[in-house]
Amino acid sequence: MLADLESLEKRVDNLSKKAKGNDKEAREQLDLVNRALVLLREGKPARLLERKPEEERAFGMLGLLTSKPVLYVCNVEEASAARGNEFSRLVAEQAKKEGAVAVTISAKIESEIATLSRGERAEFLDTLGLEEAGLDRLIRAGYQLLDLITYFTVGPKEARAWTIHRGTKAPAAAGVIHTDFEKGFIRAETIAYADYVALGRARPAPAMPASCGWKARTTSSPTATSCISGLILEVPPSLRGAKANEAIQSSSLTMDCFASLAMTWKCSNAPPPDHGWRRGAH
């Protein structure tokens, strides 16, 4: 906090001179600096600064240590793993004041869970009154703090997960897999996951009449589509563009599922508990 305070105070004079010379960017930065200084002088982190969406880029350019999100992890005894103890509650209260996040786990329990099979793990957690392992809670909290989500590419042979920022548009999300997917992106067909399951999970033949339940719930979306939880996007070959199709055929980074089902995405707030999906496990 002292380092941030010193850093901003050194910038004030230079920014003030530029602002007087009708430098719009300097005026905006000076305003952010002065507002951040008020918080820092009160002993509060810069991340608590209220700012508009259009100010985020300029705020990030300040490079302040206290602007970074903070996650507190409290290691407690086994008996307090479900609800925490008086000390973890104090940490949670302080984290809330700082705009941070606190997670309570028991390292002892986590070490025991690591040696169990999936079935034994669920039974063990149930006896402790826990719905999920502490590691899973930690991962989810980290994803939420960094505003990240996971989307999945799935096919007949394998499934894989990819991490993107919440609100990422479909083309940019595709670009995480391969840059040519983003360059060649045209449109995507979308359907809600609940409808996908209710309608049998099988894509009908192109000749299916428009009155078909699947088509009634499927829409063709342009590049503005965002990858959001519960939404499935399919990009058939005709809508991928030449570069994306070439990438599927030639890139060693892609898999058979991309060629068969292109990009079918189911978004989630965090990766699944069992990280086997990273290597294509179902």
Image: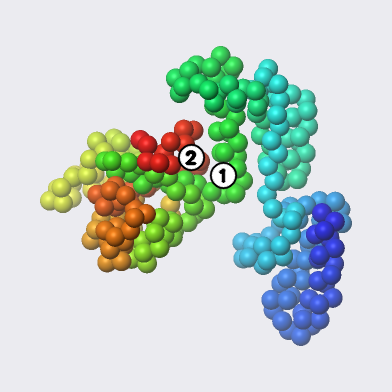
x, y percentage for residue 173?
Answer: 43, 56
Give 121 or 128, whichever is nearer the viewer. Answer: 121
Q: Quadrant of residue 65?
A: bottom right
Residue linked to disc 2: 271
Res 188 seen here: no
Seen in the picture, residue 27 relative to 6 is either above or below; the reply is: below
Q: Is residue 123 left or right of residue 78?
A: left
Q: Name the residue under label 1.
A: 143
Q: What residue type is labelled 1?
A: Tyr
The quadrant in which the N terminus is found is bottom right
Image-based side of 111 in relation to 195, left or right: right
* Closest to the observer, 264 or 76: 76
Q: Residue 229 carries which label?
A: none
The correct choice, above or below, for 4 with respect to 110 in the image is: below
Residue at image location 58% in from the left, 18% down from the top: 129
Q: Is residue 196 visible?
A: yes
Q: Where is residue 242 shown, x and y percent of the image?
A: 27, 66
- Point out the image quarter for the C terminus: top left
The three-letter code of the residue at mark 2 reads Pro
Quick check: marks 1 and 2 in contact, CB under 8 Å? Answer: yes
Mark 1 Cα shell of 10 Å, populated few (<14), some (14-19), many (≥20): many
User: Would residue 164 be found to the left or right of residue 137 on screen?
Assistant: left
Measure the alpha-carbon separation of dots 1 and 2: 9 Å
Q: Based on the displayed image, in which of its 4 quarters is residue 79 positioned?
A: top right
Secondary structure at badge 1 equals: helix
Q: What element carries label 2?
A: loop
